[in-house]
Image: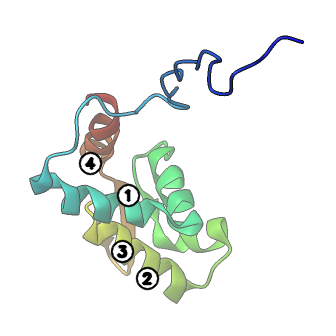
Amino acid sequence: MAKVELGSARRKTPEPAVTCCVSLLGAPLDESVNSNLAEAFSALGDPVRLRLVSILAAAADGAVCVCDLVPAVGKSQPTVSHHLRILGNAGLVSGDRRGKWVWYSVNRDRLAELRSALNDR
């Protein structure tokens, strides 16, 4: 019988770790813009607010009356106003009072800034 020594088998060199996903960013975000971007992305993190932004972005006239947004998202007027305030604070939408109603439009420059934060890094 051949004698086998323990530990004499060749050990395999471990394979380098494979990254499961490619990073969306080529470089880390600058600290000075983190808070600003986080507020905007957080505002978009709610389904109702995301729906409001999509409705405003698709508006043929560039603006939508708040009276039309209420039935479009199926929420009460105070709830829609609350969500529009959050989007406004994040710089994503702006309102323009026309008589008794407020017409909202999306801030396309702000949306482009958010898109750029992920694409250009």
Q: Name the residue under label 3.
A: 86
Q: What is the three-letter code of the residue carrying label 4?
A: Arg
Q: Is residue 112 left or right of residue 54?
A: left
Percent coordinates x, y for residue 106 in the rendering: 36, 53
Q: Could you tell me which secondary element the residue under label 3 belongs to?
A: helix
Q: What is the three-letter code of the residue carrying label 1?
A: Phe
Depicted 41 relative to depicted 26: above or below: below
Q: Mark 2 points at which residue?
A: 82
Q: What is the three-letter code of the residue carrying label 3?
A: Ile
Q: In which quarter of the image is the C terminus?
A: top left
Question: Picture quarter containing residue 74?
Answer: bottom right
Percent coordinates x, y for residue 87 in the rendering: 36, 67
Give the label, 2 or 1, closer to the camera: 1
Q: Decide: marks 2, 4 in contact (CB < 8 A)?
A: no
Give the label, 1 or 3, closer to the camera: 1
Q: Decide: marks 3, 2 in contact (CB < 8 A)?
A: yes
Residue that extends furthest to the top in the rendered view of this protein: 2
Percent coordinates x, y for residue 89 in the rendering: 26, 71
Q: Name the residue under label 4.
A: 110
Q: Could you tell me which secondary element the residue under label 1 belongs to?
A: helix
Mark 3: few, some, or many residues within 10 Å (few <14, many ≥20)?
some
Mark 4: few, some, or many residues within 10 Å (few <14, many ≥20)?
some
Mark 3–mark 2 Cα distance, whole angstroms, equals 6 Å
Q: Decide: marks 2, 1 in contact (CB < 8 A)?
A: no
Mark 2–mark 1 Cα distance, whole angstroms, equals 17 Å
Mark 1–mark 3 Cα distance, whole angstroms, equals 11 Å
Q: Decide: marks 4, 3 in contact (CB < 8 A)?
A: no
Task: Tell which of 26 and 85 is nearer to you.
Answer: 26
Mark 1–mark 4 Cα distance, whole angstroms, equals 11 Å
Percent coordinates x, y for residue 31 in the rendering: 13, 54
Q: Is residue 98 left or right of residue 77?
A: left
